[in-house]
Image (cartoon, grey):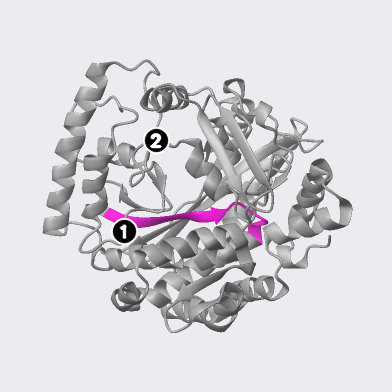
Amino acid sequence: MGQEIESDILSPYDFSVFSKNLNDETRLLADFFDNNTFSSEGPVGGYEIEAILVNGAGQPASINQDFLEKMNNPLVVHELAAFNVEINSLPVYLKNNALTQMQTNLQATWDACRVVARNSSADLMMIGILPTLQEEQLTLANMSQLNRYKALNEQIFKLRNGQPIKLDISGKEKIKATHHDVMFESACTSFQLHLQVPYSRAVDFYNVSIMLSAPIVAATANSPYLFGHELWDETRIPLFEQSVEIGSADYRRVTFGSGYAQHTLMECFDENLAHYPVLLPLKEQDRDEHLSHLRFHNGTIWRWNRPLIGFENKQAPHIRIEHRVIAAGPSVIDSIANAAFYFGLAHAYANEAESLQQELPFQIAKENFYNCAKHGLDAELFWPEHGKTSVRNLLLDRLIPAARDGLKAININVDEIDRYMTIIQERVKSQQNGANWQRRWVHRHGKNMQGLTCAYLQQQNSGLPVHKWDV
């Protein structure tokens, strides 16, 4: 979805041509899978982080067009709302000092962004949902002025037959709202990880990413408040799912998925073609050997773990897993620790994927995920060999040590493993992830969302990981 379209005015002919090309490219991708023409390189990691521009009062600042022009950095791009931007990384081979390299690069880009923002009397935040955000700020007037976003809004409501979005989330408190555009989505800001793997291992990595989503979302939860209401530990999960809700109950546009992959990840792209109508037609004249129509269509289906096809410098196509469950923030070092945790766990469990798939049925993995998104580090879940257990105990006793082993297996430097896994361990031990820090601040200071936002930004800028933040 990062690619712009020529116009927000779309005709039936545009959809017809796109659908034909999508069909052709799906068959071409099937040939790639049948003949195994994919790159064998891996593991390679990367990320996207969605950030929020705020003014001095901690309110959203809708200045991304001016901000991006001044940044003039191809890695920093538009997001749906005019108060959001997205920071992308360059791919990094996951070995040796890769994690430090990722942190150094993210910190440099983050610091440069903050300098540009401050020159416009603003600042930049990474947090799952901005506590000061109000529903009345989520209007088309605050949408980024790109054709793809205007068209996205129009097409979603066309598929909904003009019916408004209905938000209904029950957590510690409850919220119900009705909205007439897609801007609820812009309240959700994420840290999306990319893991390029060899073709022969893609199914295993995809399936374990699904299984691991529950404990990872519990450890990284960072969005307990929406419009002043205390809801889920990771409220971003139900909010995003409901903000663009179209399709059948089994095939929502934002979804945990319909099952594990059985043979190849081609199954996901077949599902895309069979069950997801074209949302936006990219205007390309002919079928593209780089699968531009197929990849664009895939970008309008937001699985929490999404398979991606990429082409690097006109080389053979590669497969990567996009792990989308982690919220933005709380800090740069927390973000890289979260990345290290996912990369390590995925490599620790990929060799056991087939047996785990039998012991942890997809439906149970799905229930684990929503339970952990709702209750965070207080959640219980089902896990092989443990039965029903505390996610906190599972993280400390089993998963954090496993992530260390996974990182060792890909030759990450020992000191890096210790640095980042200690952050995850201390976060879980203290039960202070981003969501719990926000709740503890409110418990001490009252439900003052502006005060919470400003205190959070101050702590974020300290550079400390969240388990060391004062309340």
Q: Residue at x 69, y 49 (%)?
A: 173
Q: Residue at x 55, y 63 (%)?
A: 372
Name the foreground residue: 402 vs 2.
402
Q: Residues within 10 Å of mark 1 (few under 14, many from 20)?
A: some
- Where residue 253 appears, as percent x and y from the top left, is 39, 41
Q: Which residue is mark 1?
A: 259
- Relative vertical location of residue 382 with respect to residue 397 in this rendering, above or below: above
Mark 1 residue element: loop
- Relative vertical location of residue 276 with respect to residue 393 in this rendering, above or below: above
Mark 2 residue element: loop
Task: Using the numbered discs, state the Cα–Cα distance from disc 1 to disc 2 in whole angstroms.
Answer: 19 Å
- Where residue 197 appears, as percent x and y from the top left, is 33, 63
Name the foreground residue: 256 vs 294.
256
Is label 1 in contact with label 2 (beta carbons under 8 Å)? no
Magenta range is 318-333
Answer with left or right where residue 303 lies relative to residue 200.
right
Amino acid carrying mark 1 in the image:
Gly
Name the foreground residue: 465 vs 263.
263
- Quarter of the rendering containing residue 264: bottom left
- Where residue 298 appears, as percent x and y from the top left, is 32, 42
Identify the mark nearer the N-term, 1 or 2: 2
Q: Residues within 10 Å of mark 2 (few under 14, many from 20)?
A: some
Residue 399 belongs to magenta span: no
Residue 331 belongs to magenta span: yes
Location of the C terminus (image quadrant)? bottom right
Could one spot residue 301 in this view of the protein?
yes
Q: Residue at x 37, y 38 (%)?
A: 300
Q: Which residue is mark 2?
A: 246
Location of the N terminus (image quadrant)? top left
Q: Residue at x 76, y 56 (%)?
A: 439
Q: Residue furthest right?
A: 445
- Quarter of the rendering containing residue 321: bottom left
